[in-house]
Image (cartoon, grey):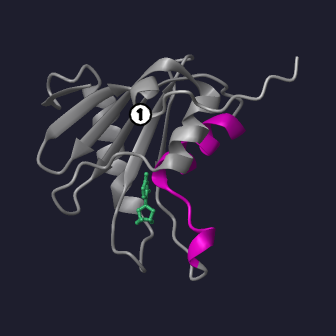
Amino acid sequence: MIKTSVEDCGYKALAEKAKEAVENAYCPYSGYRVGAAVLTENGNIYTGCNIENASYGASNCAERTAVFKAVSEGERRIMAVAIFTDEGNDAPFPCGICRQVLSEFCEPDAAIIIYDGADSVYNAELAELLPYSFQFNNE
Ligand code: THU
């Protein structure tokens, strides 16, 4: 994992899409806005935001919104993911559930771009964030 700038992260356009997506965040309970964007092997970008619910457990993270949008449009392979928040000073590392969902549709070397509101970026590979991920092989 390297720490860099949005200019030099190699995925500036994807990071900017995640930043735009934060504007749609629905987070009346936490007030913590998150945007995400995924780049598929077909070269398409799908965005997502967090969507909270009065029954907190029914909330959905930004990353999973973006992944589910992509998969529901027929995409099956995600090459890179960008996540953005401008809330607080901490970089928006994906939660454990999102890491597992990403592992379903990403190779271990997929780029995960973690972008905070201060224009600094962590560029990680999924396998660094979720080593030894659970896989179900039913072949
Ligand atoms: N959240 C995300 O959207 N992505 C993550 O990886 C972690 C958390 C959202 C869920 C909830 O709406 C808010 O951030 C606070 O947990």
Q: Secondary structure at mark 1?
A: helix
Q: Residue at x 23, y 62 (%)?
A: 87
Q: Is the residue 5 above or below the residue 119 in the image?
A: above
Q: Which of these two is toward me, 32 or 139?
A: 139
Q: Which of these two is toward me, 35 or 57?
A: 57
Q: Is the residue 129 above or below the residue 106 in the image?
A: below
Q: Residue at x 13, y 30 (%)?
A: 5
What residue span does the magenta drawing correspond to? 56-72
Q: Residue at x 42, y 72 (%)?
A: 27
In which quadrant is the C terminus drawn? Answer: top right
Q: Which of these two is toward me, 130 or 60?
A: 130
Going by the picture, which residue comes out furthest to the right? 139
Q: Which of these two is toward me, 88 or 72?
A: 88
Q: Percent x, y for residue 14? A: 34, 31
**Residue underneath mark 1:** 129
Q: Residue at x 46, y 24 (%)?
A: 127
Image side of residue 136 versus residue 55, left or right: right
Which quarter of the figure has residue 77?
top right
SS majority, magenta: helix
Q: What's the residue type where badge 1 is placed?
A: Leu
Q: Percent x, y for residue 31? A: 34, 74
Which quarter of the figure has residue 93?
top left
In which quadrant is the N terminus drawn? Answer: top left
Quadrant for ligand 1?
bottom left
Image side of residue 106 versus residue 12, left or right: right
Figure label count: 1
Image side of residue 67 versus residue 86, left or right: right
Binning the other alpha carbons within 10 Å of mark 1 as few (below 14), some (14 to 19) or many (20 upward) gives some
Mark 1 C-beta to ligand 1 under 8 Å: no
The magenta stretch spans residue 71: yes
